[in-house]
Amino acid sequence: MEHLDHKRKITIMISIMAAMLFAALNQTIVGTALPRIIAELGGLEYYSWVFTIYMLASTITAVLVGKLSDIYGRKPFILAGLSIFILGSFLSGLADTIVQLIVYRGIQGFGGGMIMSTAFTAVGDLFSPRERGRWQGLMGASFGLASVFGPTLGGYIVDHTDWHWVFWIFLPFGFVAFALIWWMFPSVDRREGETVDYFGSLFLTLTIVPMLLAFSWAGTKYAWGSTAILGLFATSLTALAVFLFIERKAASPVLPLFLFQNSVFSVSNLVGFMMGAGMFGAIMYMPFFVQGVIGTSATASGFVMMPMMISMVIASAFGGRLITKTGKYKKMALGGLLVMTAGMLSMSFMSTETTNTFAVINMIIVGLGLGIGFPVFTLTVQNTVEQKLLGVATASSQLFRQLGGTVGVAVMGTIMSYRMTEKMKQLVEESGIGSLATQNPELAKKLSVLQNPQILLDQAKLAQIRASVPAPIQGKFDKIIEMLRDALSYSLSGVFWAGAITVLLAFTLTFFLKEIPLRTSQSAQAESEAEQQLL
């Protein structure tokens, strides 16, 4: 699409950003609304699955679509992605149980993976690596813009109306995005001589799914050393071995293994994995802290999250322009990761005494680091591959980032659950309420209900339970609530600490990233020169 004039390229980018904005709005609006949704539907033990299933589905889709879009072009897949995402959003709003919500979120994930993979690859089709910095920054800013309004609107909806509208409110915008892509995005002919690697795709899926299920269930549904978890890991490793064998023989592999011989490609994807694990794993639990520990309403929780997204938008736009101007990116990546680590480390020191103001400051710090560092690693991957491999290379970047996010959410969910249980046991023991409950059946009944921290997310229900407690033991009831907040705070501090350590590892690894000047052309000669610099 290099032959297109500048005005046409801009109109295409507008349509791409509209599609991204639709997907991002529907994704970010869920964050602050989900604690209340869980409080209504029940199933706190499946809390992380609402995020995990989305990332799992989008992870699988992104890498498969990356290769297919190299063959058939980007347009059919971004249109299909929008259609599937619209369907998933509509069904999510009809969910009556947590299981239904998880299934429908999976459908959303399939569509979201298609949209994100093709959107970022299309930027590479339209612009040279040097120019992509600006556009990657703007795309990050559009996602950030959605993240500004999404959480706040999500909180407002669950506080003032039916939560089902969280999934329905942006559906008209999806149809507008579909029309823009259909009208503006150019179609391309199928690339001849390319075959679809069906067996490679199958065994890549069989590698990813059991691995993520194992991480999601270990420590919660099953013990880490249980037969089920070990069996899932064994299945994943076996499928991986078969996948590697197939990819070595395939004429047109779904994920060409020779790409990993490129140190920039390998380091960038490994850093992306760690960033995804740290960011998704920690930040997804922030609304839980704000609403459950601080006691903020869902609407106000959105305002607490908003500054992070605003700072991310500003940093992303600024960083993108700076990369385009200088052609350099390594120092920016290091700076962004260091700032992000500092923000997450500060989050780990939050407690029941934390105010919304302190939480906002932490969110701003994390947002600045995220906005500066996050777009860099897609750019580095695109800068090191031939144009014909752009789709699969960009999809691999999405793959590792999403894998990291899925593993991060799952592992940190295990950390939260374990620390919550242990801390609650300790507090009940120290307070003596446990022995008192054995003598008071009414208190024992209330205590069993209050063992579940999701009660903290529904202040109205909490007040209703308190009103039903006999006056003589209301003081004990308040003590239990205080202990529950302490336990939840303690468990989430561990989650944020783990996120900070993970991002710090990504920062360290970035020192090994070889900086290749960003090309100002997409010509074959320029590609050849760039490849020579890698040797």
Image (cartoon, grey):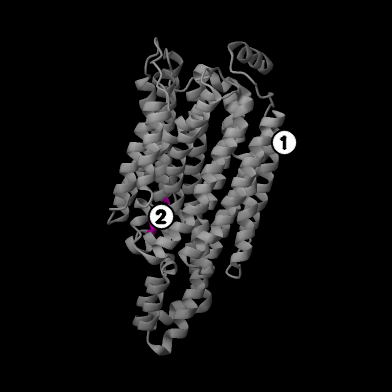
116 to 192, vertically: above or below: below
Residue at point 40%, 43% (across, down): 54
- Assess disc 2: are there few (<14), some (14-19) or many (≥20) residues with their C-alpha within 10 Å of its C-alpha: some
Q: Which amino acid lies under the numbered mark 2 shown in the image of this protein? A: Tyr
Residue 308 lies, in percent from the top left, at 59, 53
Q: Which amino acid lies under the numbered mark 1 shown in the image of this protein? A: Lys
83 to 189, vertically: above or below: below
The residue carrying mark 1 is 331
SS type, badge 1: helix
Residue at point 62%, 11% (across, down): 525
Instruction: Name the residue nearer the viewer: 324 or 31.
Output: 324
Residue 30 painted magenta: no
Residue at point 49%, 79% (across, down): 479
Residue at point 37%, 78% (across, down): 464
Instruction: Name the residue nearer the viewer: 403 or 522.
Output: 522
The residue carrying mark 2 is 47
Query: How many numbered discs, if any?
Result: 2
Q: Is residue 85 visible?
A: yes
In the rendered view, does 205 fall on the left or right side of 267? left
SS type, badge 2: helix
Taken as a whole, is the magenta stretch helix, strand or loop?
Answer: helix
> What's drawn in magenta, residue-wise?
44-48
Instruction: Name the residue nearer the viewer: 169 or 286.
Output: 169
